[in-house]
Image (tube, grey):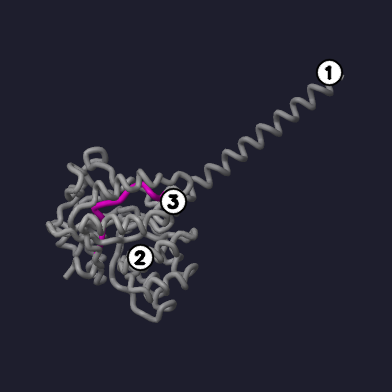
Amino acid sequence: MKKSIFIKLFSFLLLFTGAYLFGTGAAFLSEHFHSDHSSHYNDSSQDVSQSGAVPVSADGNWGLSFQEDGQLPTGNATMEELAQYDAYYAQDTDEKVLYLTFDAGYEDGNTEPILDALKKHNVSATFFVVGTYIESEPELVKRMVEEGHTVGNHTWHHPDMSQIADMDSFKKEITDVEDAFLAVTGQEMTKYYRPPQGKYNKANLQMAKELGYKTFFWSLAYVDWYQDDQPTEEEAFDKLLGRIHPGAIVLLHSTSSTNAAILDELLTKWEEMGYQIRPLSELIQ
């Protein structure tokens, strides 16, 4: 009798342990997938002093150091260094203008309300999309174009482009997206490029330039990409209102439910602060 009870107890413990390990493994894989495909992967508002300043000539992540709210942050590279490669992270101006951009790696239902808010405010934004997004969401891509937005190139697979050393591989990541965009819209893609994860090096920037691309980093973003840990509206407004500055290139993620919920009010608040929201085409003129 005791032996039977012991066997049942042992079997239960084995079953429980197996279920726990399976659940933990599944959770890990899910977290890994979302961190690899569904996020911007780096806190875009991190201080350079924390991440280590990286010159434009070296491999690194784009990073910012915010010295004072309402003022242009310092980037890993200066505007002058980036300009050699037709690259930008903000505009050098005292005029209250900003440039609104979104990164789109997949669709979770938040892009439509974002487009609705942009349309309501007559704002033209830039959506940097990966190739698979064009394949899976052709109607949304067509809507972006029809409503006056620019669709930019965020590569096909969203790799660490700083690890791609040859032009052929770099070019394929870019031109495959162009081909998909042309097939869906019947139009040539505007040659705006955003490096995935903000990872770049001098060679990459030169390759993009040789392909006729303008490269765009950003001067304002916040941690909005964790689908299961979205910032509160108060946290979002604190960053996006407190750190807005003249000439800002703002990066938001179109996957963020918080962004979808606040964008109408955010645009109103920026307008009340005296900001004009302009397309990137005006920055590079």
Q: Secondary structure at mark 1?
A: helix
Horizontal and vertical percent position of residue 88 = 20, 60
Horizontal and vertical percent position of residue 114 = 40, 62
Q: Which residue is mark 3?
A: 36
Of labels 3 and 1, earlier in sequence is 1
Q: Is residue 222 magenta?
A: yes
Q: Which residue is mark 1?
A: 2
Identify which residue is drawn at 49% across, 67% down.
136
Identify which residue is drawn at 18% across, 51% down.
77
The residue stretch that appears in magenta = 215-225
The one nearer the camera, 81 or 210, is 81
The secondary structure making up most of the magenta span is loop
Q: Is residue 194 visible?
A: yes
Q: CA distance from mark 3 to mark 2?
A: 28 Å
Q: Which residue is mark 2?
A: 118
Q: Is residue 55 visible?
A: no
Q: Mark 3: give few (<14), some (14-19) or many (20+) Cα within 10 Å.
A: some
Q: CA distance from mark 3 to mark 1?
A: 51 Å
Asked if residue 229 is positioned above or below residue 154 in the image, the reply reads: above
